[in-house]
Image: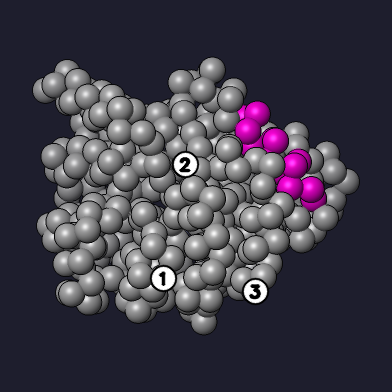
Amino acid sequence: MTDLAEFIAGLPKAELHLHIEGSLEPELMFRLAERNGITLPYRDVEELRAAYDFTRLQDFLDIYYKGADVLRTRADFHDLAAAYFARAARDGVVHAELMFDPQTHTDRGVPFEEVIEGLLSAMAQAEAEFGITSQLIMSFLRHLPEEAAFETLAMAQPWLDRIEAVGLDSSEVGHPPVKFAQVFAAARDKGLRITAHAGEEGPPEYVYQALDLLKVDRIDHGNRALEDPVLTQRLVDEEVTLTVCPLSNLKLCVIDDIARHPIDRMLQAGLKATINSDDPAYFGGYIADNYRAVVDARGLTRGDLVTIARNSFTGAFLPDAEIAAHLARIDAYVANAE
Ligand code: HPA
Ligand code: ZN
């Protein structure tokens, strides 16, 4: 495993499923609270971490939205993303597609501009400092009405050339993709790529809706698609990338034991599965921790890890030439590691 752990850390990879607000570590949360004159309802970092005990998605979301309240200024968003990139660089991440939830901030009175300009400045810095390229995925909160998503899309208009895709996150059950069919059509018309959380807690029907109604380019999570063999085969045939998040699945009880994580079943079925960290500050690990967790639990081979890293680039919202360059980089790394 030491061997494989080293191999994982050096393996060039893309992170495709990362909520930047979910990378807010307790230490930074306390620092930003102090900077902004906010009193957190926790005595210290230990007490806050102890509250990260979830039995379902909603338990996590309740605490995650509260934590985001310390993010007020563009400097806060910059520092948040800069901390993520510094950590991701150590895990061999060379390209990251960051989801951000504007509504979590604009609904508290934080201007859209503060959010996005802070993130963009950290993204530019990460490229200069670590050579990590990155893009933004603007995610709509599905517990809010479609009208609110339209308002967010309108607010984003001046920055649309800096936003690659739109996504759909927050409370899944009871908020099916069909609720957002119109706003995703509008986003597609603006040339944005499309992704959506589906099949994390929601049924296979939500994955069908994401494909047929939102016309997604990829699916975030997708675990429950495995319950439907016809759907699974369709995802294989259409080469739909799944952004799988093993430690998130464990923490949110999508699986009851990491030893039963379906990542190897996904690969064996021919699904384009990738491994990602989702909300690393809350779920106990960054991307390489997620790779290592399933190596330990499911005995993935070096070949499986290479397949997963390759899938992370073929599934990225990047031009073909850049994808090809990343794949060549993996080939060189593997050849060198032999
Ligand atoms: N699922 C749904 N919404 C989210 C998540 C997640 O894992 N993380 C942040 N918002
Ligand atoms: Zn997610």
Q: Is residue 213 magenta?
A: no
Q: For ligand 1, tell me if the residue under mark 1 lies within 8 Å.
A: no
The kind of residue tagged 1 is Leu
The residue positioned 28% from the left and 24% from the top of the image is: 325
The kind of residue tagged 3 is Pro
**In the figure, 258 relative to 21: above or below?**
below
Q: Is 191 on the left or on the right of 110, as rendered?
A: left
Which residue is identified by label 3?
Answer: 145
**In the figure, 74 relative to 45: above or below?**
above
Badge 3: few (under 14), some or many (20 or more) residues near its Cα, within 10 Å? Answer: few
Badge 2: few (under 14), some or many (20 or more) residues near its Cα, within 10 Å? Answer: many
Foreground mark, 3 or 2, reads 3
Q: Is 156 on the left or on the right of 199, as rendered?
A: right
Badge 1: few (under 14), some or many (20 or more) residues near its Cα, within 10 Å? Answer: some
The residue positioned 31% from the left and 66% from the top of the image is: 223
Which residue is identified by label 1?
Answer: 213
Foreground mark, 1 or 2, reads 1
Label 2 element class: strand
The residue positioned 79% from the left and 48% from the top of the image is: 111
Label 1 and label 2: CA atoms lie apart by 23 Å
Q: Is residue 121 magenta?
A: yes
What mark, if any, has residue 97 been given in the picture? 2
Q: Quadrant of the N terminus?
A: top left
Label 3 and label 1: CA atoms lie apart by 17 Å
Region in magenta: 110-122
- Percent position of residue 322, x then y: 33, 28
The kind of residue tagged 2 is Glu
